[in-house]
Image: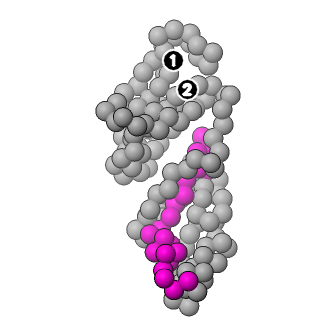
């Protein structure tokens, strides 16, 4: 990898499958080198996929097939800024529809346990509005949602 700082994500033997899904789902994403274990290790055998280099929306990542001992949590998530409802729907549906699950306020979890925030840019713009009453209306609307609905956020923001 060229990057000095790379996000390492732990998987239970599914790093390559996950990397391929991310590369197919998100723009500016790709699978790079696949490295196989030079010997047996606690989570696998010699020749198994040990690590996978990939990018997610331009962010360098390394998938490590480290075994079942470590689970992902919401303490780490990818936040993806979307431009409109169509992009929000496409990404949300790709994650949730591929064995993932919905969570509140634009959060969802993929089938490997990674958390994603699918966040329309309008939501972020509403939150930083100097009119704090308008910002709160948008925030309150978001609090009732799982997937973010752009039109509802815009309507709440406008009042």
Asked which secondary structure carries label 2, the reply is strand
Q: Position of residue 100 (x, y in %)?
A: 61, 49
Q: Position of residue 42 (x, y in %)?
A: 63, 15
The residue drawn where x is 45% and y is 44% is: 22
Colour mapping: one colour
| Most distant residue in the left direction | 2
**Distance of mark 2 from mark 1, alpha carbons?**
9 Å
| Most distant residue in the bottom direction | 159
The residue drawn where x is 59% and y is 16% is: 44
Per the rendering, the mark at residue 65 is: 2
Residue 156's quadrant in the figure? bottom right
Q: Position of residue 38 (x, y in %)?
A: 47, 10
Disc 2, disc 1: CB below 8 Å? yes
Image quarter hosting the N terminus:
top left
- Provide the residue span drawn in magenta: 109-132
Per the rendering, the mark at residue 48 is: 1
- Answer with left or right where residue 96 lies relative to residue 20: right
Q: Is residue 127 magenta?
A: yes
The residue drawn where x is 66% and y is 37% is: 71
Q: Earlier in the sequence, mark 2 or mark 1?
A: 1
- Answer with left or right where residue 56 lies relative to residue 104: left
Asked which secondary structure carries label 1, the reply is loop
> Height in image: 125 above or below 4?
below
């Amino acid at each position: 990898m060229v990057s000095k700082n790379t996000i390492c994500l732990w998987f239970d033997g599914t790093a390559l499958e996950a990397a391929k899904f991310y590369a197919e789902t998100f723009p500016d994403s790709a699978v790079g080198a696949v490295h196989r274990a030079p010997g047996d290790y606690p989570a696998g055998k010699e020749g198994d996929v040990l690590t996978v280099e990939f990018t997610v929306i331009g962010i360098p990542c390394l998938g490590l097939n480290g075994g079942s001992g470590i689970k992902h949590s919401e303490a780490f998530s990818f936040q993806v800024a979307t431009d409109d409802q169509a992009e929000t729907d496409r990404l949300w549906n790709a994650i949730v529809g591929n064995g993932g699950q919905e969570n509140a306020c634009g959060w969802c979890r993929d089938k490997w346990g990674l958390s994603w925030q699918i966040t329309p840019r309008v939501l972020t713009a509403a939150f930083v509005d100097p009119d704090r009453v308008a910002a709160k209306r948008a925030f309150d609307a978001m609090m009732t949602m799982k997937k973010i609905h752009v039109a509802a956020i815009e309507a709440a923001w406008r009042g």
